[in-house]
């Protein structure tokens, strides 16, 4: 991801030894996210954020460690990234699009952007301000279609959550 949280569209597979490499990455600020649904997840026990912010320098190797645990992802958990001027369902959503979840799902909005954001609307009312790397979790307890926005950037950051039975 770019430093503001927008997806770059690049991905690589991890080899059997647990290593991966990106070639031809431009110098600058980036975010790198480990994503292996239903296979493994980044362990919270080590205090490592996912995504991780990294600085790539010309002619230097940048090493990033993701301590992971094997496991099965829960279909009842959905992550929506909050970036600078967008919401994005991970991993295959569209910026400021519609996310559909089942009743009882946990929806986690996670601020991957550089600015303060919030999630306002729907039955949860407001997340309150979320600093960079902050999150807000709401358990979908009401069926319906819920437009929401960031009040700090309300003309650019508008999305919809649909909760089905």
Image (spheres, grey):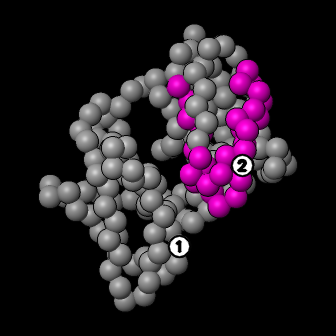
- Mark 1, secondary structure of its residue: strand
The residue that appears at 50% across and 68% down in the rendered structure is 30
The residue that appears at 44% across and 78% down in the rendered structure is 56
- Mark 2, secondary structure of its residue: loop
The residue closer to the viewer here, 45 or 7, is: 45
Q: Say if 11 sits above or below 91 in the image.
A: below
The residue that appears at 66% across and 13% down in the rendered structure is 143
Near mark 1 (Cα within 10 A), the count class, few <14, some 14-19 or many ≥20, is some
Near mark 2 (Cα within 10 A), the count class, few <14, some 14-19 or many ≥20, is many
Disc 1 target residue: 29
Provide the residue span drawn in magenta: 106-134
Q: Say if 69 sits above or below 12 in the image.
A: above
Task: Find residue 80 and report its image quarter.
Answer: top right
Please provide percent x and percent y for residue 107: 56, 30
Main secondary-structure element of the magenta-colored stretch: loop
Is residue 36 rendered magenta in the image? no
Mark pair 1, 2: CA separation: 20 Å
Disc 2 target residue: 117
Q: Residue 64 bears which disc, if any?
A: none
The residue that appears at 72% across and 48% down in the rendered structure is 117
Q: In the displayed image of the protein, which residue is found farthest to the top?
A: 165
Q: Earlier in the sequence, mark 1 or mark 2?
A: 1
The residue closer to the viewer here, 99 or 80, is: 80
Please provide percent x and percent y for residue 133: 56, 51
């Amino acid at each position: 991801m770019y430093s503001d949280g927008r997806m770059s569209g690049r991905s690589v597979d991890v080899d059997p030894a647990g290593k991966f490499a990106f070639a031809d990455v431009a110098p600058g600020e980036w975010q790198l996210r480990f994503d292996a649904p239903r296979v493994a997840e980044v362990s919270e026990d080590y205090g490592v954020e996912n995504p991780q912010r990294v600085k790539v320098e010309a002619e230097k190797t940048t090493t990033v460690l993701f301590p992971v645990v094997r496991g099965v992802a829960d279909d009842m958990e959905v992550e929506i990234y909050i970036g600078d001027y967008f919401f994005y369902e991970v991993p295959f959503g569209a910026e400021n699009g519609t996310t559909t979840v089942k009743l009882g799902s946990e929806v986690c909005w996670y601020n991957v952007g550089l600015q303060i954001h919030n999630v306002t609307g729907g039955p949860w009312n407001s997340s309150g301000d979320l600093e960079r790397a902050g999150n807000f979790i709401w358990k979908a307890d009401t069926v319906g279609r819920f437009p929401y926005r960031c009040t700090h950037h309300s003309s650019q950051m508008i999305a919809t959550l649909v909760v089905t039975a």
